[in-house]
Amino acid sequence: MNFPLDKFKKAETPFYYYDLALLQRTIDAVKEAAHDYRVHYAIKANANPTILERIALNGFGADCVSGGEVQAAIDAGIAPEKIVFAGVGKTDSEIALALKYKIGCFNCESLPELEAIDEIAGKIGHTAHVAIRVNPNIDAHTHHYITTGLAENKFGISMEQLPQVVDAAQRLKNIEVVGLHFHIGSQILDFEPFEALCNRINDLQDLYANELSLQMINVGGGLGINYNDPDYDSIPDFEQYFSIFRRNLKLRTGQSLHFELGRSIVAQCGTLISRVIYVKEGIRKKFVIVDAGMSELLRPALYGAYHQIENLSANSDSTPEMTYDVVGPICESSDVFGNEIKLPLTQRGDIIAFRSAGAYGETMASNYNLRKLNPPIFS
Ligand code: LLP
């Protein structure tokens, strides 16, 4: 990626930099590969208004998990009927807000939630469209914090309990079950679990052929990206991803297929930019201490995630490669971006980039230690 280094040098760090041209190329690739499939961008990955507006302009819907995200989708100009609302703990006021906007669908995760939606919808004389989130018991082979499809966890309804929930849902007057929803995890690079998901859905559709008339199937998100080599793989292979579903999923006549992609759309266009405060010589280690920390990019500290680290100031051709631990300024030992990272000779004041940070970077930032994240820069 070509970074506007002169601009960065004049700016206060840390901040997020977004390459909107790359975002647009990624969106175009999704549109080209998705054809008639409906894509609801998962706002939790990045809720920056400029990015959301770009998503809206391209006709994508939104996948939201809070009233705040529903409002952000509406504010960005996303059509209400293209909004789906998931989450295990929707509050009454969030449900009321979503009903007020007449969103497309609630992805429901429990019986008490279905009952709450029914009651609130009844009070305002609406019929709420819902998809039941089924836990398909598929191991996505990803980090255990972001795998969600296994049998017993807080998400969704197990396949064993599904008949009972379907039965109960059909007795509720103010909701209409229009679909089934699934999401097996995030940062999935192996396509086999998606194929297993298709087979599971085919079985379920056969099983409930008489009980449910399903207008839609929502398979969630989860497509991973290449954190190790962002320049080589700046746009994920959406063709291959969607073709898994095209080949394996047996949709019924008139059924629409929905996706909730987050990371794969926005991760590579975002970079966290920071400055080196000090280079500290330890006994055996050298530490590069930067002015960004886990408060701006939590993924390394929380998941041990790797983001490629680049020194944009150093001339990599003429300076020697050194080995550093790259760390933030936060008072936590887990505030480490990478151990034994090879960088050109690095000095105080150099600009350091943390790549592939467009997804779950800015949205997971906090002001821990009362720190300040500067406004993003867009290209
Ligand atoms: N749909 C549902 C129901 C989800 O729970 C998620 C993500 C998505 C869609 C979007 O998944 P994606 O396409 O972005 O993989 N903070 C973690 C990721 C958490 C993902 C949570 N759910 C990280 O930084 O890796």
Image (tube, rainbow, N blue to C red):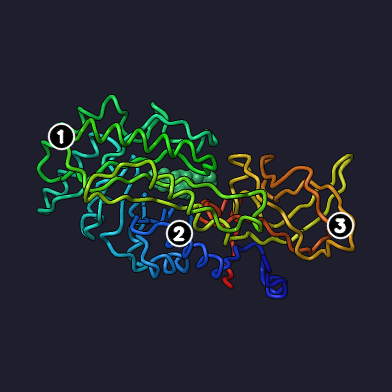
Q: Earlier in the sequence, mark 3 or mark 2?
A: 2
Disc 1 under 8 Å from ligand 1? The reply is: no
**What residue is rendered at 83% in x and 58% in y?**
346
Q: Earlier in the sequence, mark 2 or mark 1?
A: 2
Label 2 neighbour load within 10 Å: few <14, some 14-19, many 20+ = many
**What residue is rendered at 43% in x and 44% in y?**
244
SS for callout 3: loop
Q: Earlier in the sequence, mark 3 or mark 1?
A: 1
Label 1 neighbour load within 10 Å: few <14, some 14-19, many 20+ = few
Along the line of sight, the residue nearer the viewer: 361 or 232 = 232
Residues marked 2 and 1 touching at CB (< 8 Å): no
Type of amino acid under label 1: Glu
**What residue is rendered at 38% in x and 41% in y?**
248
Q: Disc 2 and disc 1: Cα gap in Å?
A: 34 Å
| Residue holding disc 1 | 211
Disc 2 under 8 Å from ligand 1? The reply is: no
Residues marked 3 and 1 touching at CB (< 8 Å): no
Type of amino acid under label 2: Val
The C terminus: image quadrant = bottom right
Where does the image place residue 246, in percent across and percent down from the top left?
38, 47
Apparent side of residue 146 relative to residue 154 in the rendered image (left or right): right
Where does the image place residue 127, in percent across and percent down from the top left?
14, 50
Residue 181 location, quadrant: top left
Residues marked 3 and 2 touching at CB (< 8 Å): no
Apparent side of residue 194 relative to residue 277 in the rendered image (left or right): left
| Residue holding disc 2 | 30
The vertical placement of 152 against 174, above or below, is: above
Type of amino acid under label 3: Leu
- Which labelled disc corresponds to residue 345? 3
SS for callout 1: loop
Where does the image place residue 121, in percent across and percent down from the top left?
15, 49
